[in-house]
Image: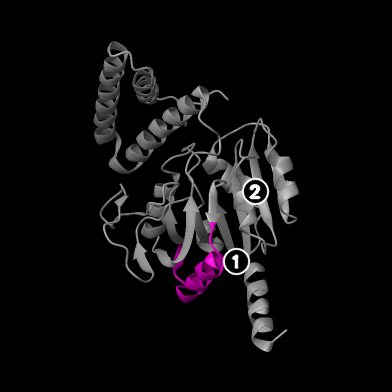
Amino acid sequence: MPANETADTDVAESIWDRVTVVIVCHNSASVLPITLGALPDAKRIIILDTVSRDNTCDVAKATHPSVEVIRNTEDFGLAAASNQAFAQVNTEYTLHINPDTKLDLGCVERLIMTADENQNAAGVAPMLTNGKGDLEIDVMNGQEINHHKISHVPEGPFSTWFITGAVVLWRNSAFQSINGFDEGIFMYNEDADICVRSTRAGYSLILDPRATAHHFGGISEGTSLKSRIRKDWMMAWGHLYYERKYLGEAEAKAMTQKYLSDHAKESLVGFLLLRPKKFLGNYVKAKAAYQFLRGKPLWGRFPQ
């Protein structure tokens, strides 16, 4: 083997000694082979399974030799499961990825190099595309708490106040110093929340377009009626919890009341027009808002 190839191999191996992969799964058997197949050099992958009803754990073990599986008997949400998995990590970095993602060749190495070049960065993320091939990059500035689509992608790495949670390389010392994810959020907006807390604690967040990955978005669990209801409920609850956390009680209450009213009206329209998806989705969001206003704990303990 030529000397330069040997050196490149040594660098790759040393990089993978510094990072642990964490993937939280729920009925993810159909997509895990794609995700794990893009991580052939990973030396430790923690699969945190949240009560999957398919063979997610068996598929994970059969697909990659470095997989360790933690099976939970109850689903307390993405934020709690992620914190549980992070607690098992003893490397400098954690690569936290969704089960429905695929990282391009060299993505992880580039993320680590960028993190090394920016020692104050809590997290570094790649440029993402979705299942349609469109860019999936949201950003926000220091005065905002709600992210929005980027209008122009710079050629090199840039600092932002938000990085999408589908693929993030976290510096573990920073992650632990801000106490990880807020477990009051089941899922949806847990990434925005940790980004706000990271930047307010003085850390930077970096998006590096030289690292690329793909997020197939929501195909892990499928599109059953129950999964759609679950998604709408958690999306509403995560949004309302997040807004209350940063807006304050009075403004958040008014916003929640409007949210309830708007979705109740849209649900009625769906019912009258015989559009069951419109009716059901808005009904679930309205009910979640109603429960939230009543002060139900955390994310409402949606039934599995």
Instruction: Please name the colour scheme applied to the rendered image.
Output: one colour
In the rendered image, which quarter is residue 249 located in? top left
Q: Position of residue 217 (x, y in %)?
A: 47, 43
Q: Is residue 230 above or below residue 65?
A: above
The residue segment tinted magenta is 103-124
Q: Quadrant of the C terminus?
A: top right
- Mark 2 surroundings: few (<14), some (14-19) or many (≥20) residues within 10 A: some
Whether residue 220 is visible to the viewer of this picture, yes or no, is: yes
Which residue occupies 44% across, 24% down?
296
Residue 122 is left or right of residue 96, and the answer is left
Q: Nearer the viewer, mark 1 or mark 2?
A: 2
Image disc number at residue 92 = 1
Residue 67 at x, y = what percent? Answer: 71, 52
| Percent x, y of residue 109 | 56, 69
- Which residue appears at 67% of the width and 64% of the height? 41
Query: Is residue 86 in sight in this rendering?
Result: no
**Residue depicted at x 68% and y 88%:** 3
Circle 1 Cα neighbour tier, 10 Å, few/some/many (<14 / 14–19 / ≥20) = few
Sequence-earlier tag: 1 or 2: 2
